[in-house]
Image: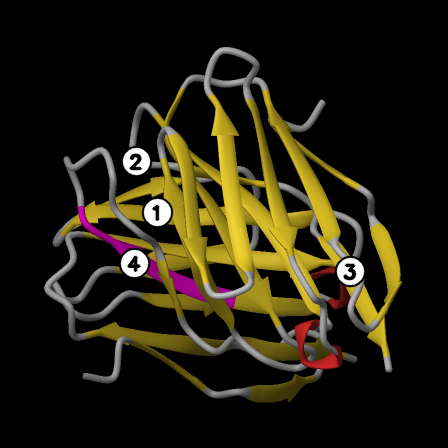
Amino acid sequence: KNEVEQSPQNLTAQEGEFITINCSYSVGISALHWLQQHPGGGIVSLFMLSSGKKKHGRLIATINIQEKHSSLHITASHPRDSAVYICAVRGTGNQFYFGTGTSLTVIP
Amino acid sequence: NAGVTQTPKFQVLKTGQSMTLQCAQDMNHNSMYWYRQDPGMGLRLIYYSASEGTTDKGEVPNGYNVSRLNKREFSLRLESAAPSQTSVYFCASSRTGRRNTEAFFGQGTRLTVV
């Protein structure tokens, strides 16, 4: 069983739609990360959070430590948001655990 | 500030050939990691180094060796490549000993073993 589970695996949205990607984890964590990977590209960190909520532009990330759950929201989605979004948690040691990613396609 | 630099970006090997993937970071991070990414499986840890001179096996170490040459560099070697090692490889680094620290990733190396 994966330590980090993401849903959905694939998501197609119309431009302008509100998008939610969910992440659940089963290990104790020091922080949770949301990463973005564009096709053929590297991986960049969008958010790192250990409690509450963070917002950056049209992206919002929330975490509920008690429920071991996090969500990534994209408001007013745009085709340039099309990418794979990866949830990762940093365990109580130095290791990271990764979800399998959510592939998002935003259609104009 | 280049962050994490990986070379090469693409490589094709024949079965049995050897090669070394290079990784360097300029953020003075202690922790460095090598992952492989395969479809439907997410990132899996191959090896990890908490500091210069130390390395530890991750989830999928078989067929690989690593070397932490100094604080900046962490290389991954395939001694005898196999088709099962066809994958995208990512190097990453982070600070050690701090709870809230980001991981920074290289651009990835797309390796094909034929």
Q: Nearer the viewer, mark 4 or mark 1?
A: 4
Q: Which amino acid does label 1 sit on?
A: Tyr
Q: Which residue is drawn at 64% across and 77% down?
A: B111
Percent of width and height locating residue B61: 51, 46
Q: In this view, does B6 lie to the left or right of A78?
A: left
Question: Is the residue under label 1 in contact with that under label 2 (CB below 8 Å)?
Answer: yes
Q: Mark 4 lies on which chain?
A: B
Mark 1–mark 3 Cα distance, whole angstroms, equals 27 Å
Q: Is residue A53 left or right of residue A25?
A: left
Pointer 4 local density, CA inside 10 Å: few below 14, some 14–19, many at least 20:
many
Percent of width and height locating residue A92: 32, 23
Q: Is residue B93 magenta?
A: yes
Q: Give the SS element for disc 4.
A: strand
Q: Which of marks 4 and 1 is nearer the N terminus?
A: 1
- Point out the residue furthest to the top here: A66
Percent of width and height locating residue A16: 78, 69
**Circle number at residue A68:** none
The residue singled out by tag 3 in the image is A103
Q: Magenta residues?
A: B90-95
**Circle number at residue B93:** 4
Q: Is residue A49 magenta?
A: no
A19 over B77 or under it: above or below: above
Q: What residue type is labelled 2?
A: Asn
Mark 2–mark 3 Cα distance, whole angstroms, equals 27 Å
